[in-house]
Amino acid sequence: MKRTYRLLYRLGTLPWQHTDIPTAVQDLVVGPEALPAGRTVDLGCGTGEQARYLAAHGWQVTAIDYIPAAITAARRLDPDGTVDWLVADVTRAEEITSGRRTAATVGLILDNGCLHGIAAADRPGWAHTVDTLAAPGATLLVRAAPARRASIAVPAGINRDDLTALLADNWRPADPPDTSPRSMWHRYTRL
């Protein structure tokens, strides 16, 4: 998928990009059970719509994408520099924490469609990054397409059971599982 994402950015075709902030994200920020603003990381931020939304609501945001063109576009859309934009691979915690005080300090980790495009062999690196960043009691919100056969243009997805296993014993589901076939949002709490 990495080549596909790079090509799509080069072509300026971003089918996953939407200006609407997902309800699941809004609920954590302004809903009746909103989290108190604190430090957050947006993994696979793309051009940063959600990162800017979180910053506008008082969060201290680090937004990460491995595609330089995505971060360049995100910085242009954030002229006041309200977000810390970082080009890094989310499967390599050291790229994110090097020179930053982010280890074990993040209260909200957002992954809106990043993990489901990561190759299965690299997913333990993503889990290590999430574990490294998260403070005790942190919230992890992941949007992932259900598991399916991957192709050059379609991410493999990940189902809730596999995501829970990937997170091992460090996280627990924060909500009852949505067993509908189209379920895509998964929320966890760091132990």
Image (cartoon, rainbow, N blue to C red):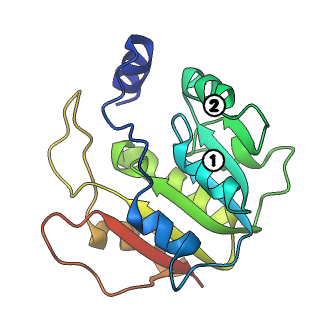
Within-10-Å neighbours for mark 1: few <14, some 14–19, many 20+: some
**In this picture, residue 89 sits left or right of residue 157:** right
In front: 153, or 126?
A: 153
Residue contact at pointers 1 and 2, CB within 8 angstroms: yes
Q: Taking 61 as reference, is 27 above or below it?
A: below
Quadrant assignment, res 39: bottom right
Q: Position of residue 128 (x, y in %)?
A: 58, 59
Residue type beneath disc 1: Arg
Q: Position of residue 31 (x, y in %)?
A: 51, 78
Q: Which element carries disc 2, helix, strand or loop?
A: loop
Q: How many numbered discs?
A: 2
Residue type beneath disc 2: Leu
* Residue at screen point 58% across, 70% down: 29
* Quadrant occupied by the C terminus: bottom right
Q: Position of residue 161 (x, y in %)?
A: 28, 73
**In this picture, residue 119 sits left or right of residue 39:** left
Precedes in sequence: disc 1 or disc 2: 1
Q: Position of residue 64 (x, y in %)?
A: 62, 42
Compute the Cα span from label 1 to label 2: 9 Å
Q: Which element carries disc 1, helix, strand or loop?
A: helix
Q: Taking 65 as reference, is 32 above or below it?
A: below
User: Is residue 141 among what the camera can see?
Assistant: no
**Residue picked out by circle 1:** 52
Quadrant assignment, res 159: bottom left
**In this picture, residue 95 sits left or right of residue 13:** right
In front: 182, or 173?
A: 182
* Residue at screen point 34% across, 49% down: 116
**Residue picked out by circle 2:** 77
User: Is residue 7 among what the camera can see?
Assistant: yes
* Residue at screen point 40% across, 58% down: 22
Within-10-Å neighbours for mark 2: few <14, some 14–19, many 20+: some
